[in-house]
Image: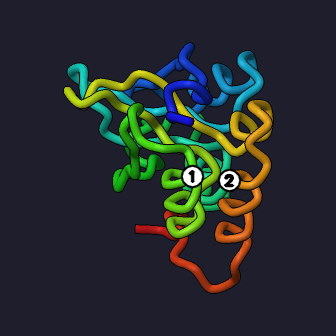
Amino acid sequence: MRVSEAMSRDVQIANPDQTLQQAATKMRDLGIGALPVGENDRLVGMITDRDIAVRAVAENKAPSTKVREAMTQDVKFCYDDEDVDHVAHNMGDQQVRRLPMVNRDKRLVGILALGDLAAQGEARPAAQALEGISQPGGRHTQAPS
């Protein structure tokens, strides 16, 4: 199965100049925990609820702080035509629960989350990814930069 068959296509994005409060409100309203960050039609980061908690709230930053100050800049992504098993393995290796999907022109076309794999009945790839994500001592992208 290709990633394009499992990913969520209706992806909302944040702008790096939006405030953390605006990003958090969007996450709340959409019932999600992460937003790709786009600027000039390019993927420049990811902002998660954990980024907001760890890089902003825990550091006593104001809700008016810009997304760019708390987002993860080293964005991992996959292509929408890749095989689900391969991508799930990469998610485990990279210890990420959500992965932006781009087409071969590097335009954001979707996002793949562990829940998307499970919803498609892809239990083995989801379990494989979760096993890697759950390993202790891995490199965490939410570590302060």
Mark 1: amino acid: Asp
Q: Residue furthest bottom?
A: 137
Quarter occupied by the C terminus: bottom left
Question: Residue visible at 76% across and 59% down?
Answer: 127
Callout 2 secondary element:
helix
Residue 114, by quadrant, is top right
Q: Nearer the viewer, residue 53 or 1?
A: 1
Q: Nearer the viewer, residue 116 or 68?
A: 116
Decide if residue 41 is in sight here: yes
Q: Nearer the viewer, residue 24 or 136?
A: 136
Question: Residue visible at 73% across and 71% down?
Answer: 134
Percent x, y of residue 89: 55, 61
Q: Nearer the viewer, residue 80 or 138?
A: 80
Q: Disc 1 vs disc 2: Cβ atoms closer than 8 Å? A: yes
- The mark nearer the N terminus, 1 or 2, is 1
Percent x, y of residue 8: 60, 23
Residue hosting label 1? 85
Residue hosting label 2? 125
Decide if residue 16 is in sight here: no
Q: Is residue 31 left or right of residue 53?
A: right
Q: CA distance from mark 1 to mark 2?
A: 5 Å
Residue 109, by quadrant, is top left
Quarter occupied by the N terminus: top right
